[in-house]
Amino acid sequence: MPESWPTTRSRRSSIVAQFGEARADLVGWALTTGDPLADAVVDEIHEHGRAVNLALTEGLGHGLASLTDPPPAVAALLRETETLPDYVDDALLDEASLPHFSSPAPVHILSLSAGSLVHVYESPSISKVLATTGKLIESAPRRLAETGKWIATALLPGALRRGNPGYVATIQVRMLHAHMRRLARNRGYDEAADGVPINQIDLARTWMDFTLTSYTAEQAMGFGCTSNELASLYRYWWYVGHLLGVSPRLVEGISSHDDARRVADLLQAVTGPAIPESSELAFATCRAIAGQLNDVLSLPRGMGLQAMYALTRRFHGHAVADELGLPHAFAADRLLTPAISAIRLRRAKLRRDPAAWRREIEKGVARAKSAAEGTDAAA
């Protein structure tokens, strides 16, 4: 762990000037902290091998109580994940994520790709970690597909109950981060410059991209949520963050985009400028998903990639898109406006009929469950 403020992540004095001493102290801790509980399990796996993995798998599916003499690090991790924060109740687990399903799955993939992941990759520290783990660009489509599948699974009603698929998948993502953290360290990642690989700032920034960035991107495509729906979704994501090992000091209590932007400004202040790998990942992500735009926004065939560039500029602004080297796409951008207006009108009409709106959500949940189970949902 670096003993001083990482050299590429702004300066403590700058953070004090912008945000105050207390926030600077929090950021200094977050930049130099990974996920001690998950990291300890990875160390245990490397020391004792397959038995630890088997214990972890059994514990995730059936609970800590199902294990006899569990490995100490596995027991500590499961003890934390099985301890529910005081805001978690049946209503949160069963209903808080429902607004997510008012939009069709391809919309979430678009907001995840051109929105969330492009912004994730803008972080030089995250891009460096991905670069050290190999196959940076070739893995981008698979990474997108796996991330989309995890989010769809984690947000299904009831999915985060102990032993259920969303709970298991979310902690598996947490363990993936821990394995990547160890691998990056073993391959020369510069902690003195960038802080601990996949540190708490990086985790919180990624959490923000799955919430603030994703939902504002969907709003820009015409699939917006009300303030009450957003408050419900953010509350659900507090618990997702808890299972992912994100410190509650960084994300808990956020209930609106305004709340989130105040925290995002702090995180962005210690992110640093994009690097060439950031641009390569952004291009690869746009290429991987361009074809789905035709289905969502009814654009002419062949306009998908250009529309992805146009959407990325709408989501992140021209300064970020220019920094990443993404081209302008003026013709595609002109086509987006009437398509998005038509979507907004349709959703506004649906909202005026509560029964129709509920049916829309129920259809979205049914499709997501069918996709998770590998079956076809009825239209």
Image (cartoon, rainbow, N blue to C red):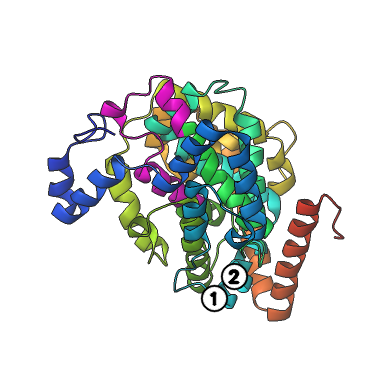
Q: Which residue is mark 2?
A: 93
Determine if the magenta segment contains residue 190: yes
**Secondary structure found at label 2:** helix
**Secondary structure found at label 1:** loop
Q: Which residue is mark 1?
A: 89
Residue 112, how many percent across, how many down?
57, 45
Residue 179, how many percent across, how many down?
51, 34
Do callouts 2 and 1 mark residues in contact (Cβ within 8 Å)?
A: yes
Residue ID at (41%, 29%) = 322
**What is the quadrant of the N terminus in the image?**
top left
Above or below, 190 against 120 in this view is above
The foreground one among 198 and 75 is: 75
Determine if the magenta segment contains residue 310: no
10 Å crowding of disc 2: few (<14), some (14-19), many (20+): some
Looking at the rendering, the stretch of residues picked out in magenta corresponds to: 181-210
Report the disc number at residue 291: none
Above or below, 229 against 152 in this view is below
Q: Is residue 331 left or right of residue 376?
A: left
Q: Looking at the image, can residue 311 be seen? A: no
Residue 331, how many percent across, how many down?
59, 35
The foreground one among 370 and 298 is: 370
Residue ID at (48%, 23%) = 131
Task: Give the main secondary structure of the magenta stretch.
Answer: helix
Name which residue type carries label 1. Answer: Asp
**What is the quadrant of the C terminus in the image?**
bottom right
Residue 103, how many percent across, how many down?
66, 59
Name which residue type carries label 2. Answer: Leu
Question: Disc 2 to disc 1, how far (Cα)?
Answer: 6 Å
Residue ID at (65%, 78%) = 352
Residue ID at (62%, 56%) = 67
